[in-house]
Amino acid sequence: MIVPKPGGSARGAWSTATVDLAVQVFIDREDGRRDLFDPPTEAAGSAGFDSWRETVWGSPRARSLGARLLPRLAEADLLVEPARLHDLLEECALLRDRLETLIPGMDALDPHAPGYYVNTGSHVRIESAEAVAHFRHTVAQRLANIESAAMYALVVGGGVAISTAARAAEPAPDAPVEPTVPSPCAPCACAPGSCADPQPDADDTEP
């Protein structure tokens, strides 16, 4: 397995790395803190595999279609400030409407392989129509996740962050978090004298 080095890529290499890109919402607080959290939607919160930075979002084809924000993922994580959210939504709509142009020739059978040559003098891969259709559907879903995050960010006055998934996010604002209430212990079924956590007798409890 050849894994691209940070800042580079393994051109022509087969990679089985399955690191995801996470799409989240951020809010800058008055005290300078930046809160990062998952939007409270049914979306999985994924923007694709990490290698999609170059093979999909940062691909020459995406750039030629007019994408300007998502291709930045090829160089670094993407932070879209609140003032650019409408640009991000327009870009997602552009790529979704042009999937038939964006997808053909990409590595649909192994979409997370960075820069694998689909057709060269020594490597020829025939991608089935089913594989291409599934890949197109997957890319459309990832675009929908990005759009959902952008629309929620518009509501809460935040921005959108797309980065390698590496840490748990904070709960979304205004999403109630129910406190954990310890449940009463069930009656002990241990043999007499062997219980590691004996239950109090009724006569020993305070009124």
Image: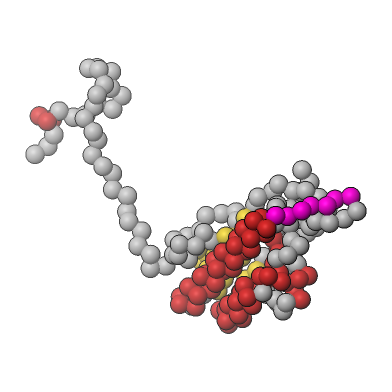
Pinpoint residue 100: horizontal percent, then vertical percent. 68, 70
Pinpoint residue 176: horizontal percent, then vertical percent. 35, 62
195 relative position to 34: left or right: left
Eyeballing the image, is 83 above or below 48?
below
Which residue is at 73% across, 65% downward?
104
Q: Quadrant of residue 127?
A: bottom right
Q: Nearer the viewer, residue 74 or 185?
A: 74
Q: Nearer the viewer, residue 177 or 202?
A: 177
Residue extent of the magenta highlight? 122-128
As drawn, the residue found furthest toward the front would be 129
As drawn, the residue found furthest toward the right would be 121
60 relative position to 95: left or right: right
Residue 59 visible here: yes
Q: Looking at the rendering, in which quadrant would you find the N terminus?
A: top right
Eyeballing the image, is 105 above or below 5?
below
Q: Nearer the viewer, residue 81 or 50?
A: 50
Q: Looking at the rendering, in which quadrant would you find the C terminus?
A: top left
171 relative position to 11: left or right: left
Secondary structure mostly seen in magenta is loop
Residue 30 visible here: no
Q: Nearer the viewer, residue 121 or 167?
A: 121
Which residue is at 72% across, 79% downward?
66
Pinpoint residue 40: horizontal percent, then vertical percent. 44, 64
166 relative position to 207: left or right: right
Q: Quadrant of residue 159?
A: bottom right
Labels in figure, total = 0
Pinpoint residue 137: horizontal percent, then vertical percent. 60, 62
Q: Is residue 72 magenta?
A: no
Which residue is at 73% across, 77% downward?
65
